[in-house]
């Protein structure tokens, strides 16, 4: 099954790093202002979604869904829902972490939506790879650091192995952000798991 790549309008500086993650058969969805990244990414859209309040409708020979400006879902959320309806199961979000904190946090919540539906997704910015811990996550030593942000009031059964700072079946509350700037032991692959709660895993390049 092809992966859906959803492109938002947040700033991207390190296009070369982003392009390392792209695959030839990815299904590209550009969301409104995300169209500004098309030239530097070097990939034409399979689908365009937006209300076009931040970018002109390019009227390309690509499927385009025009949304009203006043709506419940953001352009990015609507694009995700369309892809889920089309039975995509794996997602990559780029241009979705940026200066607008409201949009950034809204986009992060889409990763929780995917987890709840049993689907997979990661977000990239210029500095990191971001995901929600699902089952067991592996982190190789190519990443400089990794850390968690607790999105649930209480997260239980947290285990971290093959890292500088390890945990075994720990329970942690969201008000205590243990887990910042952890490191993978060189030559090994760190493994992280959680029995309950939503853990935002951030791997720093």
Image: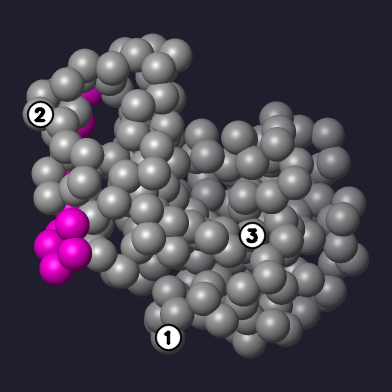
Q: Above or below — where is 56 with respect to 54?
A: below
Q: In the visual, does 153 lie left or right of 128?
A: left
Residue depth check, mark 1 versus mark 2: number of the one nearer the observer:
2
Q: Quadrant of residue 169?
A: top left
Residue depth check, mark 3 versus mark 1: number of the one nearer the observer:
3
Which residue is painted at 39% across and 44% down in the image?
Answer: 181
Say which residue label 3 marks.
Answer: 95
Q: In the visual, does 186 lie left or right of 129?
A: left
Q: Residue 10 appears at what percent x and percent y?
A: 71, 56
Magenta span: chief secondary structure: loop
Q: Please state, as top left, top right, bottom left or bottom right, where the N terminus lies in the image.
A: bottom left
Q: In the visual, does 61 lie left or right of 16?
A: right
Q: In the visual, does 154 lie left or right of 11?
A: left
- Residue 168: assigned label: 2
Which residue is painted at 23% across and 63% down in the image?
Answer: 140
Q: Above or below — where is 170 with respect to 115?
A: above
- Residue 24: assigned label: 1
Task: Look at the image and give the residue range highlighted in magenta.
Answer: 185-196
Q: Residue 65 appears at what percent x and percent y?
A: 70, 58
Q: Residue 77 appears at what percent x and percent y?
A: 59, 43
Q: Is mark 3 on a helix, strand or loop?
A: loop
Q: Residue 201 appears at what percent x and percent y?
A: 36, 43
* C-alpha span from label 3 to label 1: 19 Å
Contact (Cβ within 8 Å) of mark 1 with mark 2:
no
Within-10-Å neighbours for mark 1: few <14, some 14–19, many 20+: few
Q: In which quarter of the image is residue 91?
A: bottom left
Residue in the foreground of this view, choosing between 8 and 11: 11
């Amino acid at each position: 099954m092809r992966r859906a790549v959803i492109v938002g309008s947040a700033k991207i500086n390190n296009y070369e790093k982003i392009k390392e993650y792209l695959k030839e058969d990815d299904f590209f969805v550009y969301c409104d202002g995300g169209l500004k990244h098309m030239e530097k990414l070097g990939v034409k859209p399979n689908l365009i979604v937006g209300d076009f309040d931040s970018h002109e409708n390019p009227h390309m020979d690509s499927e385009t869904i025009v949304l009203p400006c006043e709506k419940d879902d953001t352009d990015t959320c609507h694009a995700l829902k369309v892809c889920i309806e089309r039975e995509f199961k794996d997602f990559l979000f780029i241009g979705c972490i940026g200066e607008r904190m409201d949009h950034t946090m809204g986009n992060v919540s889409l990763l929780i939506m995917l987890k709840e539906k049993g689907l997979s997704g990661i977000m990239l910015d210029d500095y990191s790879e971001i995901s929600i811990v699902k089952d067991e996550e592996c982190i190789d030593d190519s990443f400089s650091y990794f850390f968690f942000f607790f999105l649930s009031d209480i997260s239980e059964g947290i285990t971290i192995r093959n890292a500088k700072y390890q945990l075994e079946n720990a329970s942690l509350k969201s008000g205590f952000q243990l887990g910042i700037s952890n490191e993978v032991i060189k030559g090994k692959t760190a493994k992280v798991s959680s029995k309950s709660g939503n853990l935002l895993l951030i791997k720093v390049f």
